Amino acid sequence: MEPARLGSHLVVHLNRLKENFEALKKRYKENNILFMVKADGYGHGIIEIVKYAFNDLGVREFGVATLGEAITLRRHLSSLPFEIYVFSDLQFFQPELSELYLEYRLIPVISHNDDLDVVLNNPKFSNLPLCLKFNTGMNRLGLSLEKSEEIIKSLKAVNRCKIFHLMSHLANASMPMSTNKRNIGQKEKFKELKEQFISAGIELERTSLANSGALEQESCKEETHIRPGLMLFGATSMAPQHVDKSWWQGKIISELKTKVLNVFDVSKGDPLGYGSTPCPQAGTVAIIALGYGDGISTRFMGATLYHKGVAGKVCARVCMDMTYVLFPKGTDIKRGENFWIWDGDSKMFMELARETKTLPYELVIQLTTRVPRIYQID
Ligand SMILES: Cc1ncc(COP(=O)(O)O)c(C=O)c1O
C-alpha cells in the first residue's frame, strides 16, 4: 500500500471534479471558465488539480492569489500552455519582482492605480495583457470607478486601446442576485463601466464578474468569462437561508479519512484530555487520529461526526494529533477501523462547516500538509 494511505489522508476524486465542471458547463455553454485555484487549489493540491483540469477538462485559464503561487504553478507544469492570473498579492511594490510576470508569462490583475502606472509607463510591459479589476462595491481591492475617466485618458496616452480582461468582484454573491441591492448595484455599475470604455473606443476582449454564488443562480451570462472556485470542488457558497435559490447540486470531491486509535467506555463527568473536560454524558469514546496538527481545529469541539451512520460528538479539547468523539454506549466502533470526518455527502459537509463555525471554503483549505492528498479516478 502507498505509505500515504496508511494514515489519515484526503482522497480527492478527480472524476467528481469533472462531473461538477460538466454540470456548470451545461448551464454556461457560451462562457469561458477561469478556474480559481487559490490557496493550493482550495486545499486539494494545486498542481494535481490544474494538471487534471488542463488535460481532462480542457481548462486553459487559472486564477491564483499570489505571485508565489503563480510561479510555483508555472515551474511545476512548465510544459502546459495555460494562462495564470494573479489576483491580489502582485508584489509590484518591488520593481524587480514585476519582471517575473514577463519571465513566467503571468497576468497581473491590476487593482490599484500605482500598479497600473507601473504597467502603462514602462515600455517593457507594452505587450503584457492588460487585465483591470474595478471596485464596484466589494471595497477591498479594485480601481476606483471615480477614476475611470482618468484611466481611459492614461490608456489612450500610451496608445493602449484594448483591455484584455475587464473584471469586478461581487460582495454578496451568496445572496439573491435578483433582489439583493448590492448585487443589483454592482451589476449595474459594471455594465455602465463597460459601456464607458466601449464608447471611449477601448476594446474589451474579455469581461467577468461572477464567482460561485452568482453562478449558482445562473447570473452574469452576458460576460465572456466566469470565475468559479468553490462550486467546482462541490460545496455551495449560498448563505443557508438562500440555498433554495441555487440550482447547484455539486459533488464534494474529497473525503477526509482517518483511523480509530482507541475505544473506551466513559461515565458522565469522567475527565477527558488536556484540561480534563468532564464528559457530558455516559457513552463510548473513540479517539481518532486527526488533530489541530492536521487542521482539525479546536473549533471542532461539539461538532457532530458519524460512524457507520451513528452520530457522535466531539466531546473534549482537540489535541495536536487526536480528537475525542463520544458515541452512544455500545456503538459498533472498533480500534483500527476507518473513520470519515466527511465522506463526500454535501449536506454533511455543509453542516460540519456550520457546526465548526467555519465556511465550506475553510474546511479543506485548513488541512495541513501532514494530511496527504491522494488522487483517485473512480
Ligand atoms: C476575484 C475572485 N474571483 C473569483 C473567486 C472565486 O470565488 P468562489 O470560490 O466563491 O467561486 C474569488 C475567490 O477568492 C475571487 O477573489
Image: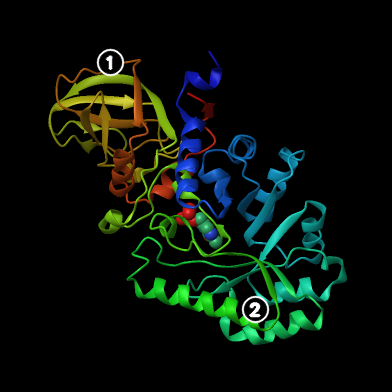
- Horizontal and vertical percent position of residue 208: 56, 63
Q: Is residue 3 left or right of residue 102?
A: left
Residue 202 drawn above or below residue 49:
below
Quadrant in which residue 328 is drawn: top left
Q: Is residue 122 visible?
A: yes
Residue 147 drawn above or below residue 272:
below
- Horizontal and vertical percent position of residue 219: 43, 62
Q: Which mark is residue 160?
A: none
Q: Is residue 55 left or right of residue 117?
A: left
| Residue at image mark 1 | 334
- The local crowd at label 1, few if under 14, some if 14 to 19, many if 20 or more residues have their Cα within 10 Å, is some
- Horizontal and vertical percent position of residue 333: 25, 18
Q: Element under label 2? A: helix
Q: Earlier in the sequence, mark 2 or mark 1?
A: 2
* Distance from the alpha carbon under mark 2 to that under mark 1: 67 Å
Q: Is residue 144 visible?
A: no
For image coordinates 41% across by 58% down, the residue present is: 218
Q: Element under label 1? A: loop
Ligand 1 has an atom within 8 Å of the beta carbon of the residue at disc 1: no
Q: Is residue 358 left or right of residue 302?
A: right
- Horizontal and vertical percent position of residue 167: 58, 67
| Residue at image mark 2 | 198
For image coordinates 28% across by 46% down, the residue present is: 355
